[in-house]
Amino acid sequence: MKIKGKYYLRLLTALMLCIVTVFSYAEESRFTASASNTTVAVGDQIQLTFQLEGSGKNFQAPNFADFNVLMGPSQSTSMQFINGSMSQSISFTYIIQAVKEGVFKIPPASIETEGKRLQSNNLTITVSKGGNNSQQQSGNQQQSGKSGSDNAVQSGGKNVFFKVSVGKSTVYRGEGVLVTYKLYTKVTLVNYGLNKMPSLEGFFSQEIPMPQQLEFHIENVDGVQYKVADIKKLVLFPQRTGTLSLDPMEGEVVARMQVKRQQSRDPFDQFFNDPFFNNPFFNNSVQDIPIKLKSDPVKIVVKELPEGAPETFNGAVGKFSMETDLDKKETKAHDPVTLKIKISGKGNLKLIDPPKIDFPPDFETYDPKVNANVTASGNGVSGSKTFEYLVIPRNAGEYKFSVSGFTFFNLDNNKYETVPGVDYILKIGKGDETTTTTVSGVSKSDIQFLGKDIRFIKTSQPLFVQRDGTLFSSPLFYTLCGAPALLFVLLLVFRKRYDEMQSNVTLLKSRRANKVAMKRLSAAKKSLSENNSEKFLDEMFQALWGFVSDRLQIPVSELSKENVSQALEQKNVSSESIIKFNQTLDALELARFAKGIAASNQEIYQKGIEVITRLEEEIA
C-alpha cells in the first residue's frame, strides 16, 4: 500500500509515541471533573474542566440542559518524561452560564482509555438570584478591610471581563475619588472597543491621560493569573450627598480561541484525532470569537461636609494656598490696574470660586479672566487656578479695598482652614479727562468733543417773531415745573428695583444666564480653534450646566438630568428640546471617555449653541 506523502510525518510520530509508551511506566488513569465556582448568581459564568490522567479517546460531554454553553470543548494535552517514564494528561474545558435559580447537578462525562470507559464525578452548582452574589462578595471585602471597592465578579471561570475599582467607597461631598476601569483576560485578544460609557450623574469628572496602547501586567485573582490593563482612569468629585451609583460600562472584545479538530472519515485523520495530536503543536486551528462585556455597577456613599463652615467657605475641598498680587500701588484715573488671585493645591480646583473683593464704587470692574493649570493623576487633581481682574479707577483719591479670606475643608484633618485675606491701598492721581480707555475691544466711555471751532458771525438782519401769550401761563411751564419731581420718583423706583435685583443673586444669575453661557461658548470656540480638546469639552460642559443652573435657579449640588428635565417641563419647554439637551450632554460625556467613537468637537459645539438658543426661547 502506498502511503500518501502528507500522512508520512504523522505516521512516523505515532510510531515513535508507541515505542516510548511500551517502555514507559503506565500509571492508573483517573478521570475527574471540577468547577471554578459552585456557588454563583444568575448570569455568572463557570469554567468546567474534565481531566484525564493518561491518554483517551471518544470523549462524551454531559448534558448541560440547565445552563447556556458559551464555549467548548477546548482541548489541551500535556506530557512529561521523568527518568525514562512518561506521564500524560488530557483536559476538556467548557465555559457555561447560569440562567435560572436553583440547585443543579451536572452528570458525569465519560471517556475511553486502555480499553475501558471511565466516568467523571458529579458536580453540584447552586445558582442564586442575580446580584446577591455580587453583594455578598462586596460585603466580604469590606469585612476583610480591603481598601477600595471591587464590584466585579472575580470568578476563575471567566476568561475575560471588565472590573471597576474605586479608591474609596465613602467620601465627603466635593472630595475626589479615583475610579479605574480594568480589562482582565486569560485569552489572546485581537481587538476591543467600548460601546457605552458609565453615567456620571452627580459627579464632576477629571480624566487621567492614558497611553495609546493597552499596557498589560499580570495579576492573580482567586488563584488564577490574568493579564490586566487599565482602560480608563478618572477622578470624580461628587456634587451631592447620598448613595450615588456609577452605571455599568459596556464593551466588546474579539478573543482568539483554539477550536477542536473536526471529525473526518479519513482513517488517518481519525487516528490523528487522538487527544495527543490536538495540542497546539499539532493543531493550529483558531477562531476569533466576539464577546460582549459589561461591568457591575458601583455605589459610592457621599457624606455632607461638617457643620460650622465659615462665611468665606465656597465649596473648596482639599488642601490649598492663596497668593494675591496688585501690579500697581499708585496710578492715575482712567488707567487700568490688574489684580491677580492665584489658588494652588490639591483638590477640586476647577470647581472653586474666587474670594470676594469689595471694590470701591468709583472703580469700573470687569469679569475676571480665569486660567486653570490642572493635572490629574492617580494621586488626585493638583495644580493652580488664577483669577485676573481688570479694574479702572475713574476718580482721583486714595482708595482701600480688601480681598476676603479663602476657606477650604482640609481632608488631612477633616477641619475647615482659612487663608487670611489681604488689604490694599491704591492712590489715584488726576488723569487725563480726554483719554478714552478701551478694554478687550470694548470702549466704556466714548467721548466726543464738539463746538471747539470758532463759528462765523452772521452779518444779516435776524428775524424776530413775537409769540402770543406768556410762558408762565402755558402748559409747557407747568410741564417743566413738574418734570423734576416726576424724574425723581422714577429714579427712586429704578433704584429700588436695582437694589432688589442686586440683593437677589439667584434672580440676577437667571437674567444673566444666556450672557454667561455665550461667553463660555466663545471660550470653547477659541479652544476648538487651538485644537485643545480637553479645555473645549470643559468649557462646553460648564456652558450647558451653568446655563440651566442659572436660568432655572437650581443649585450646582442638585444638578442632574432628572432635576433639569422636570424643571424644564414645569417651564413648558417642549419634550424635543429636553431630549436634545440630554443628548448633547451624552455626546459630551462620550467625547471625554471614548474619543475614537464620539462625535466631532465641531458637531458638539453646534449642538451646544442650538440647544442653549432653543431653551432660552422656550423657557417661560
Image (cartoon, grey):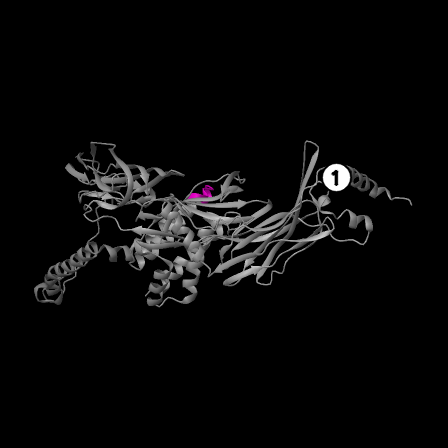
Quarter assignment of residue 310: top left
Find disc 1 in the rendering and name its residue: 21
Residue 221, percent from left and from top: 49, 44
Residue 219, percent from left and from top: 50, 40
Q: Which three-letter amino acid code belongs to the residue tagged 1?
A: Thr
Q: Nearer the viewer, residue 540 or 278?
A: 278
Instruction: Please indicate, yes or no, whether residue 73 appears anywhere in the rendered image.
Output: yes
Q: Nearer the viewer, residue 494 or 234?
A: 234
- Highlighted magenta segment, given as a residue range: 528-534
Side of 345 relative to 123 (left or right): left
Placement of the C terminus among the 4 image quadrants:
bottom left
Task: Give the residue furthest to the right.
Answer: 1
Q: Is residue 590 magenta?
A: no
Placement of the N terminus among the 4 image quadrants:
top right
Quarter assignment of residue 384: top left
Quarter assignment of residue 405: top left
Q: Is residue 529 magenta?
A: yes
In this rendering, is residue 327 above or below 253?
Answer: above
Side of 559 relative to 78 (left or right): left
Residue 127, percent from left and from top: 50, 59
Instruction: Please indicate, yes or no, whether residue 452 appears anywhere in the rendered image.
Output: no
In this rendering, is residue 513 above or below 82?
Answer: below
Side of 296 relative to 509 (left or right): right
Local secondary structure at mark 1: helix
Q: Would you call the spot at circle 1 few (<14 residues within 10 Å), some (14-19), or many (20 or more)?
A: some
Q: Nearer the viewer, residue 294 or 93?
A: 93
Side of 620 relative to 22 (left or right): left
